[in-house]
Amino acid sequence: EVQLVESGGGLVQPGGSLRLSCAASGFTFSSYWMSWVRQAPGKGLEWVANIKQDGSEKYYVDSVKGRFTISRDSAKNSLYLQMNSLRAEDTAVYYCARSRWPFHFQYGMDVWGQGTTVTVSS
Amino acid sequence: DIQMTQSPSTLSASVGDRVTITCRASQSISSWLAWYQQKPGKAPKLLIYKASTLESGVPSRFSGSESGTEFTLTISSLQPDDFATYYCQQFNSYSPWTFGQGTKVEIK
């Protein structure tokens, strides 16, 4: 079964750090672009970051540049999001997602995790 | 950055109605647009990619079309399971892969 399972969310104080993980199974992880998408409480979806299948290209939404780092480990079939200098506005459910076709990013994201909740509050 | 303007934000409809949701891109995105359905507390589900290609397993009452920078999701006959929030997302460039603001389809 193709599956993504996120972990690592929790409550953190403003200025703090968290590392999210996403464990992939059931597909050739090393062939797919992967992304993080978040959703603040009661709000819409926001794409956060993506990473090419070999990790050679990474892109971020402006609001997290310099604070968040996306990475992947194909040996562990895992995607990560290191989040530093967290702010209240980073409070959201964070989803990892797989691009629809191997080696391409333009065809949407077809496999999503269940999400992990990050709350930034003092 | 490319902006995606989705409308309406809320739509009230009845079972059996034909429903249309629109996304307008701020510049050309070719056909690199996807549509998702999201239900409360759940992850989004891919419905359509490349503007008009139906994802495997998605009912044929869903369809997508494009005209220039305007993209449309149509549900030909709304079913009880279709009451949800729908989002468009563009993939024209490497980043950012912007979403529309979402359209909540409610029971009339």
Image (spheres, rainbow, N blue to C red):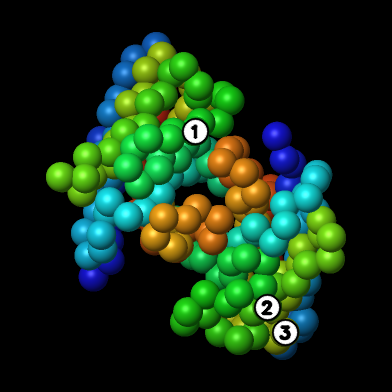
The residue that mark 3 highlights is B76
Amino acid on which the number 3 mark rests in the picture = Ser
Amino acid on which the number 2 mark rests in the picture = Ser
Check whether the beta carbons of the residues at disc 2 and disc 3 lie within 8 A of each other.
yes
Parent chain of label 2: B
Q: Residue at x 78, y 67 (%)?
A: B66
Disc 2: CA contacts within 10 A as few (<14), some (14-19) or many (>=20) = many
Quarter holding residue B98:
top right
Local secondary structure at mark 1: strand
Q: Left or right: A69 with respect to B77?
A: left
Disc 3: CA contacts within 10 A as few (<14), some (14-19) or many (>=20) = some
Labelled disc at residue A59: 1
Q: Relative to residue B51, is residue A92 depicted above or below?
A: above
Between the C-alphas of marks 1 and 2, the distance is: 30 Å
Q: Nearer the viewer, residue B17 or B96?
A: B96
Q: Relative to residue A45, is residue B42 depicted above or below?
A: below
Q: Nearer the viewer, residue B47 or B103?
A: B47
Disc 1: CA contacts within 10 A as few (<14), some (14-19) or many (>=20) = some
